[in-house]
Amino acid sequence: MPADSHPHANQPDFTLHGSGTVFLFEPLTDRARQWLETHCPLTGDHQYIGGSLAIEHRYISNIILLATLAGLQPLDFPSRNGQNPSEILAERSVS
């Protein structure tokens, strides 16, 4: 779903906690929880702590990119020159 069709455009769908080797992807909306259930099911090899997905640092950029491309809005994700998170992360993956 494109970001402009997000039902609550100002409401973030997820936030990230941590730094270093492990991050927690915490869903804040039903949309984010459904996205996680689809792409990172509890029955798979994914590690959850509470309701948050634990992600190794080497995968965090890809997870954020995929979530934002799916239309999920991050909480307090740094922007640069008006670019959205998907554009910033796409640049990083190309370099």
Image (cartoon, rainbow, N blue to C red):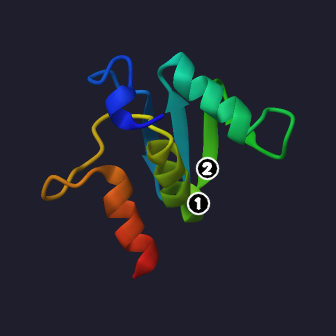
- Numbered tag placed on residue 1 in the rendering: none
Residue located beneath label 1 in the image? 59
Residue 73 in view (yes/no): yes
The location of residue 49, given as percent across then percent down, is 66, 32
**Left or right: residue 40 compared with residue 59:** right
In the rendered image, residue 85, in percent from the top left (x then y), is placed at: 33, 52
Residue 74 appears in the figure: no
Q: Are marks 1 and 2 in contact (CB under 8 Å)?
A: yes
Say which of 39 and 76 sits in front: 39
Horizontally, is 63 left or right of 4 in the view? Answer: right
Q: Position of residue 41 (x, y in %)?
A: 77, 35
Q: Residue at x 32, y 21 (%)?
A: 11
Q: Secondary structure at mark 2?
A: strand
Q: Up-down: is 33 above or below 72?
A: above
Horizontal and vertical percent position of residue 75: 33, 33
Q: Residue flagged by tag 1: what amino acid is it?
A: Tyr
Give the residue pinned by disc 2: 55
Residue depicted at 55% across the width and 51% down the height = 63
Furthest residue toward left: 81
> From what the image shows, is residue 34 above or below residue 43?
above
Which residue: 38% across, 25% down?
A: 6
Q: Identity of the amino acid at label 2?
A: Ile
Please state if 74 lies on the left or on the right of 55 as rendered. Answer: left
Left or right: residue 25 compared with residue 50: left
User: Residue 12 versus residue 49: which sits nearer the camera?
Assistant: 12
